[in-house]
Amino acid sequence: MVVLGIESSCDETAAAVYDSEKGILSSIISSQIQDHAPFGGVIPELAARKHIEALIPVTEEALRQAGITLDVVEGIAVTFAPGLVGALLTGLSFAKALAWTLGRPFVGIHHLEGHLLSPFLDTEVPPPRFPFLGLIVSGGHTSLYKITDYGRYELLGKTVDDAAGEALDKAGKLLGLPYPGGIAIDKLTQEGGNPRAYKFPIGFPQRDNLNFSFSGLKTALVYTVKKMALTPPFNQPIHDKIRRDLCASFQETIVKALVRKSLFALEETGLKELVVTGGVAANHRLRQVLEKKSKKTGIRVIIPPVNYCTDNAAMIALAGLKRLERGQKDTFSLNAISRLPLESL
């Protein structure tokens, strides 16, 4: 079966073609980072308008690179939740129009399901084996799931406030770094910085709680900066060093929280494989620490290539294929939903 996937939940417009026999035929992503950078964050109305402009050319390019026409497409998968409602509606409406015109079945995909299945896109390494633990860590989500099969997801823990990526972005903005702050922090800390220069709190450090909390960490950074009487931009050499140390220490605290809770969850469930995905899974320090823990504990850690960690339509197409193969499809009454627990599906 050949499935066309559409993703527009936030600020990336993406289209991909997935073949059940050949795998990924194409995956195209149009980023809006430059459009939102002047505002220091994603502007929902602007994101929706940009999706409208990009959906047709992105889809045409995905079909061109796949070497097929729309007539070959046998099913259409599209993200319908969670995300920015306006952004979701653009992709969902576009997918419905295609499905109706072509007379093809379409299925709405939960964004997080796509992320959890993204390791199956990588043909360079053996895929995870059910059941396994999944850590989704991005700008909007930080959650731990037990995945027992396609379509079977059990929530074990989640953030009760800020997501890890959100905390990193806000920290970057506070410290005068360019948008998106999380990527800027990652790059800066690779150049230097002492991760032990400042001690920041880890939310819910206890073993019997698998939830995350990053708002206290963010507040601690705010008060640290105020106490030091620093205000961006940091133009002096000493300020640059302080900023690198703050970034490294802040990032290290988030990495410790993510790794600690993942290891607790593995111990609690008895699982031996950990999948880490979402935009923050591209963070170099997180990957470095997880690699060390994997060698020390024997736990297999699977992190997709960076282009499949961030929002993409290939993961949506794959998730759609699995649902269509099970005979699932949606009607044209399906609506976009900003907040929807994955486990409620």
Image: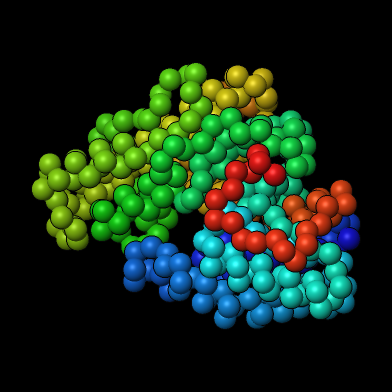
Q: Name the image quarter holding residue 14.
A: bottom right
Residue at screen point 59% across, 64% down: 88
Instruction: Report x, y in % for residue 153.
Output: 69, 37
Answer left or right for 253 relative to 337. left
Residue at screen point 41% across, 44% down: 162
Residue at screen point 31% across, 46% down: 247
- Coloring applied to the structure: rainbow
Answer left or right for 169 relative to 28. left
Quadrant (top left, top right, bottom left, bottom right) of the N terminus: bottom right
Answer left or right for 130 relative to 89. right
State how many labels appear.
0
Instruction: Report x, y in % for residue 82.
Output: 58, 54
Up/down of 201 relative to 112, above or below: above
Q: Name the image quarter holding residue 332.
A: bottom right
Residue 166 seen anywhere in this rendered image of the structure: yes
Instruction: Report x, y in % for residue 303.
Output: 62, 43
Instruction: Report x, y in % for residue 244.
Output: 28, 48
Residue found farthest to the front: 333
Up/down of 335 relative to 62, above or below: above
Quadrant (top left, top right, bottom left, bottom right) of the C terminus: top right
310 or 209: nearer the eye?
A: 209
56 or 260: nearer the eye?
A: 56
Answer left or right for 59 relative to 244. right
Residue 14 seen anywhere in this rendered image of the structure: no
Residue at screen point 66% across, 52% down: 110
